[in-house]
Image (cartoon, grey):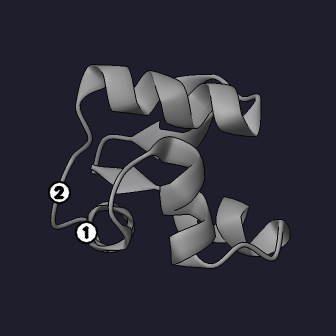
């Protein structure tokens, strides 16, 4: 699954640690999602979407 997480994070000048703190996950989890090594659970995807005030489809897309 592709995602725009790194771009959205960079637009806000957040580090991976900053984003991880806001999502209550580890920095390693954020890195794994950004690099496509891990797809977030549905509850985490919803938290990400709420944080960026975007629909899930605007952040995540199929390959």
Q: Earlier in the sequence, mark 1 or mark 2?
A: 1
Look at the numbered disc 2 and give the secondary structure of its residue.
loop
Residue 62 coordinates in the image, percent (x, y): 31, 41
Q: Is residue 9 above or below residue 54?
A: below
Residue nearest the observer in this picture, 42 or 2: 42
Label 1, on which residue?
32
Q: Is residue 4 visible?
A: no
Q: Answer yes or no: do the residues labelled 1 and 2 have beta carbons within 8 Å?
A: yes
Crowding at dot 1, Cα within 10 Å, few <14 / some 14-19 / many 20+, comes out as: some
Residue 24 coordinates in the image, percent (x, y): 44, 45
User: Residue 54 vs residue 37: left or right?
Assistant: right
Q: Is residue 17 above or below residue 21?
A: below
Q: Is residue 25 visible?
A: yes
Q: Which residue corresponds to the image point at 38% horizontal and 64% vertical from the top-left? A: 30
Label 2, on which residue?
38
Residue 42 coordinates in the image, percent (x, y): 29, 22
Residue 5 coordinates in the image, percent (x, y): 54, 59
The numbered disc on residue 18 is none
User: Residue 43 vs residue 17: left or right?
Assistant: left
Q: Is residue 28 above or below residue 38?
A: below
Q: Which residue corresponds to the image point at 59% horizontal and 30% vertical from the top-left? A: 49
Look at the numbered disc 1 and give the secondary structure of its residue.
helix
Residue nearest the observer in this picture, 63 or 53: 53
Crowding at dot 2, Cα within 10 Å, few <14 / some 14-19 / many 20+, comes out as: few
Q: Which residue corresponds to the image point at 68% horizontal and 65% vertical from the top-left? A: 9
Q: Quadrant of residue 29?
A: bottom left
Query: What is the spatial separation of the Cα atoms under label 1 and label 2, in whole angstroms?
Result: 5 Å
């Amino acid at each position: 699954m592709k995602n725009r997480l790194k771009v959205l994070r960079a637009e806000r000048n957040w580090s991976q640690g900053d984003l991880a703190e806001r999502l209550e996950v580890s920095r390693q989890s954020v890195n794994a999602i950004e690099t496509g090594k891990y797809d977030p659970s549905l509850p985490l995807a919803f938290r990400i979407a709420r944080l960026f005030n975007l629909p899930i489809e605007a952040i995540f897309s199929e390959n």
